[in-house]
Amino acid sequence: MRSLFILLSLLVFGSMASAQVTEDVAVELSAVTQVSPPQIKLKWKRVLYDTPTYQIWRKSKTATSWGVSLVTLPMTDSEYADNSVIVDSAYEYFVKAVGPSITSAGVIYAGIKAPAIHSRGIMILVVDSTFTVPCATKIQRLMDDLSGDGWQIIRHDFGRSTTDVTIKAAITADYTSHANVKSVLLLGHVAVPYSGDDNPDGHPDHLGAWPSDIFYGSIAGPWTDAVINDPGSSYPANQNIPGDGKYDQTLIPSLAELQVSRIDFANMPAFPATEVQMMDRYLNKDHVYKMDSMLVLHKALISDNFGYFGGEAFAGNGWRNFPPLVGRDSVQALPFISTLASSPYQWAYGCGGGSFTSAGGIGTTANFASNPVNGIFTMLFGSYFGDWNVQDNFLRAPLCSNPPALTNCWAGRPHWFFHHMALGENIGFSANLSQNNSSIYPIYPNNGANQIHSGLMGDLSLRTDYIKPVLNVNATNLTTGGAIINWTASPGAGVLGYYIYRADSAYGYYTRLNATMVSGTTYSDPTASLGLKYYMVRPVKLQTTPSGGYYNLGVGVTDTITITNSTLQVSSVQPVMNISLFPNPAQSNLNVAINTDNGCVATMYVVNAQGQVFDRVTKQLKAGNNQYTLSVSDLAAGVYQMVVIAGDTRVVKEWLKL
């Protein structure tokens, strides 16, 4: 009897091992790091299907190819230690399991004390004027939170009748006239662009133009409306003929330069609330989450109602993305709506045969109307509802619930990649990366890659980890010149110190004043020039994740002051300056040595090859030698210029960032 039991057990195990399931397509990665000696150890759950070997590649965050693989490991291995790494850095790894009949893959962004992201660039905030007055306070708070997280903001308010052409012209003007524009956040039901002649869900009756917010992020274009002539779709919104205002492109005509997302509650009558009420409660939850004042379990759920599906294995978007974010042991197969109604999971993926208002095995828009969504980041996939600009659309439904989810996307055609969020990137970065991906992350098949229908619902600025902010920031004048800033310490656990920033406008560029974090709750700034100044304080902690660790910044709190005394002395004599930079190449810090024959006020900033400006600071120089240190660890690798300007004197030096 015992022998029979063993035989049956072996047969069952063999059957299970040979059955192809969705999880088989994912190499589920995590990382353990150490500082001395520096090491990143990748770990993964062994792929049990087939007899694969594991190939591993590594690249920098900004590199566009993987180069030569690091190593090939046998099927029995489930970890790899990379000792060719340094502290204060992060690396992307691509791990592929290759067998006779299956290829699985995983991606992770792993780091050892990865640098904090102080500045995220300029966000263009496009506000539907329906919300300008009734949601004024909440929109103002959103802007404060965005500024406190390193975004500069340019705001435009447009009526719903304003065309996408007009809105795009405003975005393009901002992009061309300002350095470092990175994103567009659409708040409300501003014009919805349509483009293409395709049916990403595979249904013949759904062939035609689909909603395409990526139109606002693809600046170079070209976007045309002269070629496609397809009036045959069963749905009028999808019909596309020349000159109808819907674009020809099915593939993004140029890589999207900008991150784009939309928060839109229009035409959702299944929910017992007005658009203003839904916007109000969404912005409330968005703020509470960013203040680290919400219970959220760092767990993820997957509800897969498609299965392997001929190798597309849509739910692989969950099995591949979630382990680097929450850990392999924190990913579970669970019902979607009922689980999120009762437990605050951070991530959730669900897929099933769909309609405009439902997904098989998940539920309906009406289910979201009667249940809270305690999750933050969600993904849904199924037929029809990826075409989201319809009544009671299922993709937008989680954001309409009470309380709402904060993001959602149609993940499956194409695949999405969120691994950078484990070390502090925002979800808009991941959306842009996923939309532009064709070969950098070679997960195949990847139907729908680079197509115009792929979009993000929700606030693109959201990150996975936040810290409780400081309290009671107060800036006062120093009698000797400049300002002194005091604050109450952040009540968050693990806070190591604080960074202090200064700006000349509320939503402009905040210059970081201290190169190393301040451990106390006061900071003197004797170098501030006369006039209105904005001071911001942000807490920092070393955040540990399943992908290693990074310095995480909390949302900044600001105070304003009019500086009445200044130590900055402007010389009427144009100085003669010589500058030198070291080390060059630089990796973490760049030292700037300036020798001048006269005391003067100088402005220094870094410029990349595309003309984008970083780390602009104003300094009082004394006659003779001056030396300053700039943190450059958050800059991408490449060639930069250091520009120093005093009066009509301008000196430029080139340097290399590793």
Image (tube, helix red, strand yellow):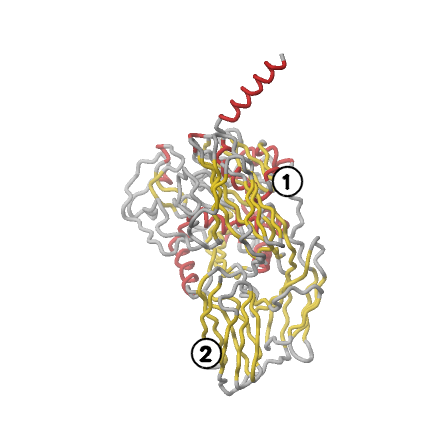
- Identify the residue position indicated by label 2 in the image: 650
Q: Earlier in the sequence, mark 1 or mark 2?
A: 1
Name the residue furthest top: 1
Give the residue type that dot 1 points to: Pro
Mark 1 or 2: in front is 2
Res 533 seen here = yes
- Looking at the rendered structure, the number of numbered marks drawn on it comes to 2
Residue 128 percent location from the top left of the image = 49, 53
Decide if residue 657 is on the left or right side of residue 169. Answer: right
Q: Residue at x 70, y 60 (%)?
A: 471
Q: Could you classify mark 1 by the number of other residues whose Cα lies within 10 Å: few (under 14), some (14-19), or many (20 or more)?
A: some
Residue 250 percent location from the top left of the image = 35, 44
Residue 451 percent location from the top left of the image = 38, 44
Name the residue furthest bottom: 573
- Identify the residue position indicated by label 1 in the image: 344
Q: Residue at x 55, y 63 (%)?
A: 588
Front residue (pair 159, 7): 7
Residue 156 percent location from the top left of the image = 48, 59
For residue 570, the mark is none
* Gap in angstroms between the C-alphas marked 1 and 2: 55 Å
Give the residue type that dot 2 points to: Arg
**Mark 1: which secondary structure?**
loop
